[in-house]
Image: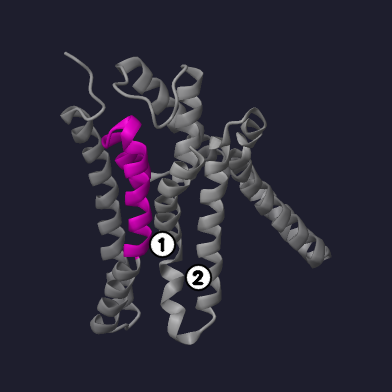
Amino acid sequence: MEFSVNSPVLFVLAGVIIAAVLGQSVYFLVKAFKRGLELNMSKEKLMRIMISSAIFTVAPAVAIIISVITLSKDLGLPLPWLRLSVVGSLSYETIAAANAESAMGLTFGQAVNLNASQYVTIASVMTLSIMVGIWLVPVVCKKMQGGMINLEKRDKKWADVLSNSMFIGMIAAFVGYVFCDVSTVLKGDTSGLIPVCVTLVSAAVMALSGLLVNKPKFKWVNDYALPVSLIIGMASAIPITAWLG
């Protein structure tokens, strides 16, 4: 039987796992609702909280859908659907998939008709790599957090510097991926500037959103800044690619 990245079997396997995660969500939702009643919170207030929370999850969900569509060109729908429904992000998943494809001589975004071996290799890289963070948190983060608390007690200024440096270092790792092909310009190939220009467009939209959030009547922008910047950034890739080739 010929392998397909959109095989019904893969949809079933992904659906079972996602259903289990949804089941956990419903379980804790019911537990939280009951606990709220025990704390003498009214049902009306709890319902308002649930409805408002559900509404505000629409914005992040748009970003997730865009991410799934982006990855589905190479990997089909089941794997991105599973990855981004349980654990993962567009930035990580894209880099992991692109690195795995590159190691096999493929180009991300241009790989078609992956065979079973290639698909399993990519899925393994995406899954095993992110699992490091899952087991590393209980092993390392407790001691690290304790060290940060002790440092903050001794010198809050340097504690803030260290914390911000760690965050900037993490962001720099992803920003470096955007600029990794800029050197192709020296060879007459301007395609390396495409991700840079797309990033600048997204950053400009996010900066504009940040300015609008400071105005009382535009507070709602805060919940939609991420998906809007993603959508406009991706849309800008079309004319930018046509321009730079």
Which of the two labelled residues, at mark 1 and mark 2, occupies the earlier sequence position? 2
Instruction: Sort mark 2 into few (<14), some (14-19) or many (20+) by Cα contacts within 10 Å.
Output: many
Distance between the alpha carbons at the discs numbered 1 and 2: 9 Å
Name the spot of residue 232 as percent of width and height, x first: 42, 57
Residue drawn 19% across and 27% down?
A: 7
Residue toward you, 20 or 171: 171
Q: In this orientation, does residue 10 appear? A: yes
Q: For the residue labelled by badge 2, is the local secondary structure a helix, a strand or a loop?
A: helix
Label for residue 209?
A: 2
Label for residue 228?
A: 1
Residue drawn 31% across and 75% down?
A: 52
* 241 relative to 164, above or below: above
Residue toward you, 199 or 174: 199
Span colored in magenta: 57-85
Q: In this orientation, does residue 128 appear? A: no
Name the spot of residue 202 as percent of width and height, x first: 51, 57
The reply, left or right, for residue 224 in relation to residue 207 is left
Instruction: Sort mark 1 into few (<14), some (14-19) or many (20+) by Cα contacts within 10 Å.
Output: some
Asked which quadrant contains residue 118, the reply is: top left
Name the amino acid type tagged 1.
Answer: Val
